[in-house]
């Protein structure tokens, strides 16, 4: 039986795994979700205990790839390669902070943020599938920091892929910039745009909307709406829950949230049968999700900068995937609600649907002062340094924990050395980069500064992409 993927807006054709991964966004503007959830039985969970992370990943993901040309042996190999490069033998270690309270460290990948866990696998899956098809793609993306470097590390030296990442010139941190500009790989290109992150995003959208350009270079994206990223993130929820006693008992998770991708993977794991008893959404001052879980209403306001920049988001694209289930998988109803939201900036969810979400989700907002306080308190109590994003998750966990008898796992989304200024402001300690990145600040950089001009950016891409032009 092969797995099929359907759009959350109900008006695009169903695709197989490869199609959904290569397409990213569905043609009706929706996001792909599996037509049915594969089941994790109690016996499966019991059998998972003691597997290596790569073995577990292959077992959990296999049903999602059913029917694709990536068979389970190939998948196991790709997972082994993807996670061999992590800086911790356990890949995603659990660290105990208190009785029944745990930190799941997701930052041991090459760029020190949780996005590596999915992207290290996704880059290899893309390469494998494209090579088999005799195709190549040009990946273009915009980044305000973390995503760009994680995508670059995932795609470097992969034959079937060229990658171009746009970032706002002089508006990302030095560590973030250097993680992109010091990569020596002939298929990796970074473009420093003289403009803001929004300008970068607009340029990327404009390239996708230029159909001739899009087809000529076979443009593609690996952004957080890609189903394969959600799929790969399900694995660490299973790993943590099994380590803490699933299927015998339920586990709670608290997740620092921006685009709702990470926490949606937890929801997906639960839909597959993982015993998750509570999910806590942590937000910074950009708290549209926390307000939604308080009031059933989503209301847009302007994005404000915070100490946790990867969560400075108002419209969380992956929330649409949760809505699809809350609206009983009625794509037309989702499309109508979102159309209204885009027009009015407001979405009021019918009470019965909202209650279904509230049965499992809580939301919590933490401002910058609270973030620094949490970093300091955790350091004083446990000796652990949290990055500002992880601190939001920890605070949300402690404030919203419903049942102290249920183990609570807060997700550590980035290494503290990725945000050294905030950590130092809170604790007086400047976290050091891990040994394998220690020379980052001395490596030679290649910075391509380009005006905020579509024509010049397209010229840059056309000059550097290796894909043969098809006429
Ligand atoms: C991307 C990111 C987030 C937000 O994750 P979502 O999946 O978008 O909710 C939080 N923290 C860090 C460090 C990130 O890089």
Image (cartoon, rainbow, N blue to C red):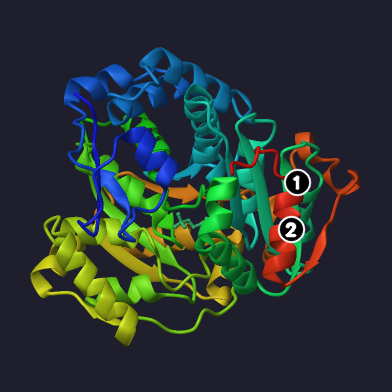
In the visual, does 307 lie left or right of 393?
A: right
Q: Which mark is residue 459?
A: 2
Q: Around disc 1, counting alpha carbons within 10 Å, would you say few (fewer than 14), some (14 to 19), or many (20 or more)?
A: some
Q: Which mark is residue 454?
A: none
Residue drawn 86% across the image and 50% down it: 446
Give the residue number, with chain letter if any, for mark 1: 464
Above or below for 131 versus 440: above
Q: Residue 420 at x, y = what percent?
A: 73, 58
Q: Nearer the viewer, residue 349 or 407?
A: 349
Q: Quadrant of the N terminus?
A: top left
SS at mark 2? helix
Above or below for 104 versus 49: below
Residue 431 appears in the picture as rendered: no
Residue drawn 67% across the image and 54% down it: 165
Above or below for 250 versus 424: above
Residue at mark 1 to residue at mark 2: CA–CA distance: 9 Å
Q: Residue 264 at x, y = what percent?
A: 33, 52
Residue drawn 47% across the image and 22% down it: 54
Q: Are marks 1 and 2 in contact (CB under 8 Å)?
A: no
Q: Residue 329 at x, y = what percent?
A: 15, 55
Q: Residue 299 at x, y = what percent?
A: 33, 82
Q: Nearer the viewer, residue 221 or 374?
A: 221
Mark closest to the chain's N terminus, 1 or 2:
2
In the visual, does 174 lie left or right of 23?
A: right
Q: Quadrant of the C terminus?
A: top right
User: Residue 202 falls in which quadrant of the image?
Assistant: bottom right
Count the marks: how many? Answer: 2
Q: Around disc 2, counting alpha carbons within 10 Å, would you say few (fewer than 14), some (14 to 19), or many (20 or more)?
A: few
């Amino acid at each position: 039986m092969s797995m099929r993927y359907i759009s959350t807006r109900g008006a695009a054709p169903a695709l197989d795994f490869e199609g959904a991964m290569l397409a990213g966004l569905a043609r009706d503007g929706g996001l792909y979700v599996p037509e049915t959830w594969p089941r994790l039985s109690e016996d499966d969970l019991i059998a998972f205990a003691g597997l290596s992370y790569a073995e577990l990943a292959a077992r959990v993901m296999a049903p999602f790839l059913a029917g694709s040309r990536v068979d389970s042996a190939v998948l196991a190999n790709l997972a082994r390669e993807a996670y061999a490069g992590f800086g911790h033998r356990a890949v995603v270690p659990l660290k105990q902070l208190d009785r029944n309270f745990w930190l799941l460290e997701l930052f041991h990948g090459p760029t020190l943020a949780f996005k590596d866990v999915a992207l290290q696998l996704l880059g290899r899956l893309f390469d494998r599938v494209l090579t088999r098809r005799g195709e190549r793609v040009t990946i273009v993306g915009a980044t305000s920091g973390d995503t760009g470097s994680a995508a670059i590390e995932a795609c470097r030296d992969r034959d079937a892929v060229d990658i171009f990442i746009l970032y706002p010139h002089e508006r990302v941190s030095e560590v973030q910039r250097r993680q992109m500009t010091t990569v020596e790989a002939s298929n990796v290109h970074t473009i420093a745009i003289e403009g803001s992150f929004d300008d970068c995003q607009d340029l990327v959208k404009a390239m996708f909307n230029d159909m001739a350009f899009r087809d000529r270079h076979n443009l593609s994206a690996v952004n957080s709406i890609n189903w394969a990223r959600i799929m790969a993130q399900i694995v660490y929820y299973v790993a943590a829950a099994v380590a803490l006693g699933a299927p015998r008992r339920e586990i709670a998770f608290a997740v620092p949230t921006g685009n709702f991708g990470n926490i949606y993977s937890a929801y997906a794991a639960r839909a597959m049968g993982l015993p998750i008893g509570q999910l806590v959404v942590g937000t910074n001052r950009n708290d549209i999700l926390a307000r939604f879980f308080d009031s059933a209403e989503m209301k847009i306001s302007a994005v404000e900068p915070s100490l946790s920049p990867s969560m400075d988001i108002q419209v969380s694209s992956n929330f649409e995937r949760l809505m699809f289930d809350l609206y009983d998988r009625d794509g037309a109803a989702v499309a109508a609600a979102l159309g209204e939201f885009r027009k009015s900036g407001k979405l009021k969810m019918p009470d019965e649907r909202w209650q279904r979400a509230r049965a499992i989700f809580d939301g919590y907002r933490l401002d910058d002062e609270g973030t620094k306080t949490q970093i300091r308190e955790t350091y004083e109590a446990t000796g652990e340094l949290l990055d500002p994003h992880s601190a939001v998750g920890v605070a949300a966990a402690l404030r919203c924990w419903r049942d102290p008898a249920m183990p609570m796992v807060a997700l550590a989304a980035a290494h503290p050395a990725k945000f050294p200024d905030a950590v130092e402001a809170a604790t007086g300690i400047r976290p050091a980069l891990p040994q394998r990145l220690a020379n980052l600040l001395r490596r030679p950089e290649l910075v391509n500064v380009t005006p905020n001009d579509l024509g010049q950016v397209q010229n840059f891409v056309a000059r550097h992409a290796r894909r043969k032009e098809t006429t």
